[in-house]
């Protein structure tokens, strides 16, 4: 099954909180992934913060055309601990 992002929020620095359609959620730090011509401009935090969730691709995209595959983001994400509502 393909992973699809349903919600994304900026956390700080190069970190983004993500929630996937299967309920998995957590943070990803993309600081170490911003290499190469398309990602280099995103090292500028104001540009990095311009990400959006693409409605059809259901992954993170930036105005300069940069994007990450949702499967890559899912694999790199630090999962949030399940809440215990006792």
Image (tube, rainbow, N blue to C red):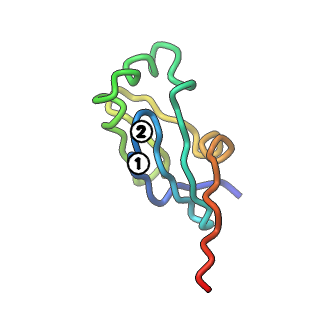
Q: Are marks 1 and 2 in contact (CB under 8 Å)?
A: yes
Residue drawn at x 40%, y 49% is 53
Secondary structure type for disc 1: loop
Looking at this rendering, what residue extends furthest in the right direction? 1
Residue drawn at x 50%, y 23% is 34
Where's the C terminus, which quadrant?
bottom right
Residue drawn at x 32%, y 32% is 63
Local packing at callout 1 (Cα closer than 10 Å; few below 14, some 14-19, many 20+) is: some
Q: Which mark is residue 54?
A: 1
Rendered image quadrant of residue 14: top left
Image coordinates for residue 27, horizontal then vertical, percent:
54, 48
Q: Is residue 38 above or below residue 8?
A: above
Where is mark 2, residue-wise? 61
Residue 23 is left or right of residue 37, and the answer is: right
Q: CA distance from mark 1 to mark 2?
A: 6 Å
Secondary structure type for disc 2: strand
């Amino acid at each position: 099954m393909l992973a699809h992002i349903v919600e994304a929020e900026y956390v700080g620095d190069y970190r983004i909180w993500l929630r996937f359609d299967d309920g998995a959620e957590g943070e990803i730090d993309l600081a170490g992934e911003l290499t190469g011509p398309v990602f280099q401009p995103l090292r500028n935090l104001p540009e990095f913060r311009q990400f959006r969730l693409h409605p059809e691709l259901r992954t993170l995209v930036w105005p300069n055309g940069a994007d990450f595959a949702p499967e890559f983001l899912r694999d790199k994400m630090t999962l949030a601990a399940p809440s215990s509502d006792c």
